[in-house]
Image: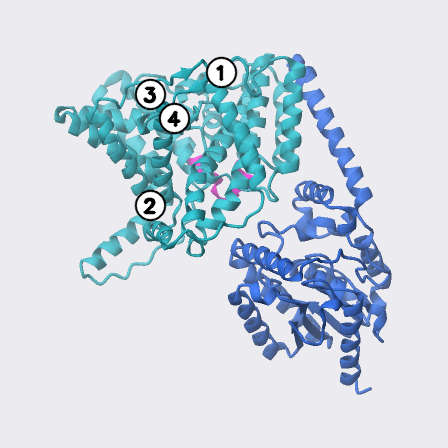
Chain colours: A cyan, B blue
Amino acid sequence: MEFNSINFFLFFVAFFVIYHIFYKRCKIQNWILLIFSYLFYGIADLKMIPVIAVMTIMTYFLGLKIEDFVQKDDKKANRFAMFSAVLCLLPLLYFKYFNFFIDSFAQLFSALGFNTEISTFQILMPLGISFFTFRLVSYVLEINRRKMSAERDFVAFAAYVAFFPCIMAGPIDRPNKFLPQLKTVRKTDYSFLTEGVKMFVWGWFTKVCIADRMGEYVDAVFNNYQDYGALSIGIATLLYPLQMYADFSGYSNMAIGIGRLAGLEVAENFRRPFFAQNVAEYWRRWHISLTGWLTDYVFMPLNIKFRDLGNLGLILAVVINLVTVGFWHGANWTFGFFGLFHGLLFIPLILSGKMNKKTKITWLGGWLISPKNLLKMGLTYLLVATALLFFRSESMSAAFSTIAQCFTGLGSMCNVGGKKIFLFSLMILLAKDYLDEGKFKFSILKTEKPLWLDLQLIALIIFIVIFRGDAVKEFIYMQF
Amino acid sequence: MKDFLVKVVVPVMAVVIGLLITVELIARNKSTDSYKIKSEYLEQHAEEIELLVLGPSGAGFGIKPDELDKKSFNCAGLMQSLLYDHHIFKKYFNRFRSLKYLVLDINFIGLHVNRICPGYDGESKIIHYSIHFDAPFYKKNFWDYKLKVQKNLLSLRKEEIPECDENGFLTFYPNGKDFKVEAANTANYYNEMVKRTPDSVYKDNLLLLEEILTICKSRGIKVIILTFPTVYISEFINPEYYSEMQQSLSDLQEKYDFVYENYTDSNLFELSDFYNANHLNPRGAVKLTRMLNDSIRKWEGR
């Protein structure tokens, strides 16, 4: 059930009404949240409900045990927390990476001249497993770090793990920020809820009017790259980051909006990534909840471990962290290369000491970005687009063939409709990001005046209904 | 909460729902009765039909039932896919007690695409609501298709929406200006659509066709598959698609023994027989229908 489908709309209206009838009765609201979350998950993937249910129950008890150890013995607590984290990760490793490991080993042995006849299983991956696993791992590690105590209320904990707006594609909420919200009266003030509607409608708009429309062009080119030349492939490569952004930030905004309408604050996931001046800043603005998670649990421990190696240690920590980011997306070397490519782009930043340096955009006359900043933004965008070409490809050989195809000539322009719509919608998205980045007084959907806001919402909804693509399309990140 | 509901939810929903209702009324008013006529005809006369025509617009404009000796009905429609043909055939199959001939239009991409193909807007374009949503695959996403139908109807000019006579024959299509340019555009559109369609669609369509052929064989209904007359399009269509379609039909023909006539670029037709590159006008339709009638007479030894 996609957020942008009528079925979801009906599902959400039912949830919203029942949920808010029990205002101030947190425990009942948690039950409702849990039931609707499992209903949502069951509709999408009924067979996999036992997976998430068992993992939730297991982690709940692991959390209690870790807390026990934390109070008695730090070393034991550390060891048990690590064991628990690995236990939480095992299903993810099995469902997502098992066949990949088998295939890779078979290829390696074949390359070494051994005769290997290993067959793989057909494994169906539970939807959202990458996202809810990271929540569970975060939970056990945070208890061990004494940032939170183990959750006693099982319903609240299970509702956190399966929280339906975020279960399929994030954002990955941290337990120490999210669980306390489930213990208190939910926010229902005007501006909080209105912000939820704004984010939902905005996410809906970017998804169906930009990402889906742009996707028709990008898919047509990348799926048949042999038929095109530099012109179409070049345009598709440049469009793909924008499609990803419109799609994934669209999903995230819708999830955050739905969360707010349930009176809950969900983690931020995007902060206008294409205004980044370098790749390091890009990662501070893109998929923030994942990069934040990996920074805390992968990069920081590695950085501490390698600190004696100086810059080399930092480079190693960054590269490993980004390769992990890559492989988190899926079991394919293209994702690994995507991460490695980004990791290598960090090296000049590390060596020049600019990795953590906050960049600032200079606004000429108070409203125009300086050419120097624009140049840096453009360069960063080109590098990101190049890396995403590998990310988008089915295999490394397909990625290189796509690049090679560009050298066969300019080729013809891909003839897919809907270009005017996504270009116009894209202008609206970029205008909003520009106005928000510059912290201008006015921006799209920025007002709180009811009449003005209502008019903007109505205009956007009508625009969506008229200009959306023909079919309800899955969000790109749901496959991860 | 109260402020939020009163100031945002209620006014926004009221205006949006009001607008959707208005659009629905406009769309219904603009929609022609062609599908209603077809739906009602099948409901009332399914038992009497001796020859049924199914398929996309090529057949809708190309077979004129009143030129045939048999009691015939044309149930083809604009970009009607095999899935929808299959649905109609299965829905009324038990009532087609007199059916002796099934004429099916398989065009260049008839086996390659269906409604799930991105950019395929045929069936949703003007199919009348009642018959359209009777099909289970449309019921599943009722509201999505409803909005799609509205959108497509609004984007069409009234004269672009064909009407039909009492026998289901589509009666009017705007005349083309430059057949060659239109053929190139149509072929490009077809090629792009096939490119973007999952391979599974082709197999699914073959299965649907086989099911129709199996039923007809078991009931002694003669199937006549036609690739309707076109001009210039074959020059621009991807030859792989064309030969793949030809090969599949030839394989099926061995198994099911149906009649297959390919009128692509046939010299039996002149440019004055066409509305545009891929649609016969009434003059061409009469010509083709009479040829079909003669064949039937021959098969029946008359």
Q: Amino acid at mark 2?
A: Thr
What x and y, as percent, mark residue A337?
29, 42
Q: Is residue B37 left or right of residue A475?
A: right
- 1 or 2: mark nearer the eye: 2
What x and y, as percent, mark residue B116?
59, 52
Q: Which residues are magenta?
A: A41-54
Q: CA distance from mark 2 to mark 3?
A: 35 Å
Q: CA distance from mark 3 to mark 1?
A: 18 Å
The residue indicated by pointer 2 is A334
Q: Amino acid at mark 1?
A: Lys
Q: Amino acid at mark 3?
A: Ile
Q: Earlier in the sequence, mark 3 or mark 4?
A: 3
Q: Is residue A49 left or right of residue A64?
A: right
Look at the image and say whether residue A44 sits in the magenta stretch: yes
The residue indicated by pointer 3 is A143
Q: Name the chief secondary structure element in magenta.
A: helix
The one of B61 and B126 positioned closer to us in this rendering: B61
